[in-house]
Image (cartoon, rainbow, N blue to C red):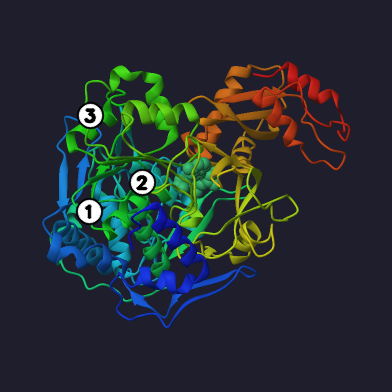
């Protein structure tokens, strides 16, 4: 159901609020179902228990692939642009993609993978990653994609948490000027993962790797002699489609669970309406499939809508800061979707990198992952969109499955820094810290959602209670996002950032508790506290305060070792930008670290540290302020 004008949006929004079941069943009717649902929705946010399209039967890959074969079998589904622009690009038509997916699905079946088994994908941005995702969905295996920048320890934790039976990976990866030993990381992780029976290795870099007999086989050997047709497993709407791990304010990353029916409907509806994708256009989302943006807006959303996408292996600054614009020019990209951190980095590199390329194909620009500052918004609009392209600032989360608050391209009037209005079906509400609704406009509060939507999280894998306490227990009968938010005089929403102990570094969500436990693995560290601080390019940087047993030793060496611990336990994305060695942390008499003060110091807001009277030892604060980095 495509929205065609602002008035139409308002009508659809009203309809979706007044009659949500009728609204969503109309959207869902556009798909191929093997059996229609009996009931659209059952829900309560108490337990929580949310079910959409109850007893409906489907397979999402029939909607992504089979359904398109007659009309667009020869249309390109993916153009693949390799890391190195001298390397050979590839493309896959819908028909080719369909057969490749079937082949890998058959390989997995032959290895004994059946419906409900978990399969981990730890791969760089090669077409085979999208193929592997779809192959899992084809046979009803639950995919758990782990971003290929995570460490062996992180990978092992994720594989163990969901007892994956199989891992699909590559020998190595190219990332900018670097070559990354992917299989080596897998080998290290698997020493701790007895559940894994099979590993299939795609040859990407050709580097020498260890192949464990009886466990590891080569992708090209496996697909050589399999059939290129594979019947789609019939799935229930509420069968698991995938698990994707994400960081929260406490403990280990949690496995966000999405299910087949609702996720399909929501990913497709939001893709179509936010970007207003038109038949024949070329769409490019620069995210990695390892994050939810890649799941919903590289794999599922675009394929469900029969779109042609660019899949990019590389990074924005390799071989130079003109790479994005060169690729836009090369493929005549019409819709371009990236993160504020990339925009800021390319802005800093200067417009000379933009100038050589023809960007006139661009029609829509998107932003995702973190708040976009007004300056970056303007630069993006002026220099990339040449003042001609709407910017869709899309707010959503791993847990929401798809875009929640965003302009609709060329329909919703935009405003720099604002995600603007909720999509149909989405009922945002701002509450104060006690959970009271903050009504009216020109207000600010904690962002919650008060009614279910089809793409929402169903549970956290293996621990439903964690899902309840994390999202549904803070405020009664509301889904709590963890974000702070303003609603301005026009009713437009502006997300201000996390209000919990999560930091957003370059659009990646990092739990401070996780970084602390990695730092605390260092034998000389007694205690640590991690907070975010404003960073020009990354949005937020990571500031760590640490207490070491060896106060007077070589501080630079200690910092290096701490960074190595973080690399080992999480990965380079969680690297602390600043490490301040302190003799104590500001604590209340009950022993709680006063993070508010640490945050203020890290932010440089020294004049107003707030109430320090409840501190056990106020002198600690003076020392921290003096030693501020
Ligand atoms: C958190 C979710 C959703 C895909 C990528 C990140 C922040 C996301 C925006 C935006 C302001 C945003 C929020 C959110 N965020 N998009 N347009 N404006 N903030 O997914 O890793 O699950 O992180 O990213 O803080 O809660 P994620």
Q: Nearer the viewer, residue 343 or 142?
A: 343
In terms of image quadrants, where is residue 283?
top left
Disc 2 or disc 1, which is closer to the eye? 2
Q: Residue at x 32, y 29 (%)?
A: 384
Any part of residue 250 in sight: no
Q: Is residue 81 above or below residue 120?
A: above
Q: Secondary structure at mark 3?
A: helix
Name the secondary structure under disc 1.
helix
Circle 1 or circle 3, nearest the eye: 3
* Label annotation for residue 326: 3
Q: Dot 1 corresponds to which residue?
A: 219
The residue most toward the front is: 7
Q: Residue at x 68, y 34 (%)?
A: 529
Q: Position of residue 81 (x, y in %)?
A: 22, 38
Q: Which residue is mark 2?
A: 409
Quick check: 548 above or below 263?
Answer: above
> Cβ of disc 1 within 8 Å of ligand 1?
no
The total of numbered circles placed on residues is 3
């Amino acid at each position: 159901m495509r929205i065609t004008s602002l008035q139409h949006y308002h009508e659809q929004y009203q309809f979706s609020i007044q009659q949500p079941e009728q609204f969503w069943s109309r959207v869902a009717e556009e798909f191929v179902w093997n059996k229609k649902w009996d009931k659209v929705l059952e829900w309560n946010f108490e337990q929580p228990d949310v079910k959409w399209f109850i007893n409906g039967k489907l397979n999402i890959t029939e909607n992504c692939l089979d359904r398109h074969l007659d009309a667009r079998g020869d249309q390109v589904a993916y153009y693949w642009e390799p890391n190195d622009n001298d390397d050979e690009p590839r493309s896959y038509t819908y028909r080719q993609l369909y057969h490749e997916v079937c082949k890998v699905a058959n390989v997995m079946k032959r290895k004994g993978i059946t419906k409900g088994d978990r399969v981990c994908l730890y791969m760089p941005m090669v077409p085979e990653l999208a193929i592997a995702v779809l192959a899992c969905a084809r046979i009803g295996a639950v995919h758990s994609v782990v971003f290929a920048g995570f460490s062996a320890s992180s990978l092992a934790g994720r594989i163990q948490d969901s007892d994956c039976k199989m891992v699909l990976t590559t020998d190595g990866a190219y990332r900018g000027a670097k070559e990354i030993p992917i299989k080596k990381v897998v080998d290290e992780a698997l020493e701790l993962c007895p559940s894994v029976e099979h590993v299939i290795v795609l040859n990407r870099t050709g580097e020498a790797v260890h192949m464990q007999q009886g466990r590891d086989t080569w992708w090209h050997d496996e697909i050589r002699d399999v059939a290129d047709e594979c019947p789609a497993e019939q799935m229930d709407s509420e069968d698991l489609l995938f698990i994707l791990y994400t960081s929260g304010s406490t403990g280990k990353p949690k496995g966000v669970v999405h299910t087949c029916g609702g996720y399909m409907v929501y990913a497709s509806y939001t893709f179509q309406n936010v970007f207003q994708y038109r038949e024949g256009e070329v769409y490019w989302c620069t995210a990695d499939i390892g994050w939810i943006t890649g799941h919903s807006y590289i794999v599922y959303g675009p394929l469900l809508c029969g779109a042609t996408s660019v899949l990019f292996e590389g990074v924005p600054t390799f071989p130079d800061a003109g790479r994005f614009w060169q690729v836009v020019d090369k493929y005549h990209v019409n819709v371009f979707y990236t993160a504020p951190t990339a925009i800021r980095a390319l802005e800093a590199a200067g417009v000379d990198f933009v100038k050589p390329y023809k960007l006139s194909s661009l029609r829509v620009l998107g932003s995702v992952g973190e708040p976009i500052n007004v300056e970056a918004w303007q630069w993006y609009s002026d220099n990339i969109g040449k003042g001609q392209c709407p910017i869709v600032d899309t707010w959503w989360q791993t847990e929401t499955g798809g875009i929640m608050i965003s302009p609709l391209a060329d329909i919703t009037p935009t405003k720099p820094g604002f995600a603007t209005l909720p999509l149909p079906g989405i009922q945002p509400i701002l509450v104060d810290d006690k959970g009271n609704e903050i009504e009216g406009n020109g207000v600010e509060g904690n962002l919650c959602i008060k009614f279910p939507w089809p793409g929402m999280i169903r549970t956290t894998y293996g621990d439903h209670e964690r899902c309840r306490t994390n999202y549904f227990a803070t405020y009664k009968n509301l889904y709590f996002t963890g974000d702070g938010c303003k609603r301005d005089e026009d009713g437009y929403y502006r997300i201000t950032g996390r209000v919990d102990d999560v930091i957003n570094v370059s659009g990646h969500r990092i739990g401070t508790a996780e970084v602390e436990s990695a730092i605390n693995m260092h034998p000389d560290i007694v205690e640590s506290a991690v907070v975010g601080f404003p960073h020009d390019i990354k949005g937020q940087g990571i500031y760590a305060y640490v207490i070491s047993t060896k106060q007077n030793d070589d501080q630079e060496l200690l910092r290096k070792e701490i960074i190595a611990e973080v690399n080992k336990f999480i990965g380079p994305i969680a690297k602390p930008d600043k490490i301040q060695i302190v003799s104590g942390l500001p604590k209340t008499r009950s022993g709680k670290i006063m993070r508010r003060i640490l945050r203020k110091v890290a932010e440089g807001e020294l004049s107003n540290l707030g109430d320090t009277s409840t501190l056990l030892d106020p002198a600690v604060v003076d020392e921290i302020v003096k030693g501020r980095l």
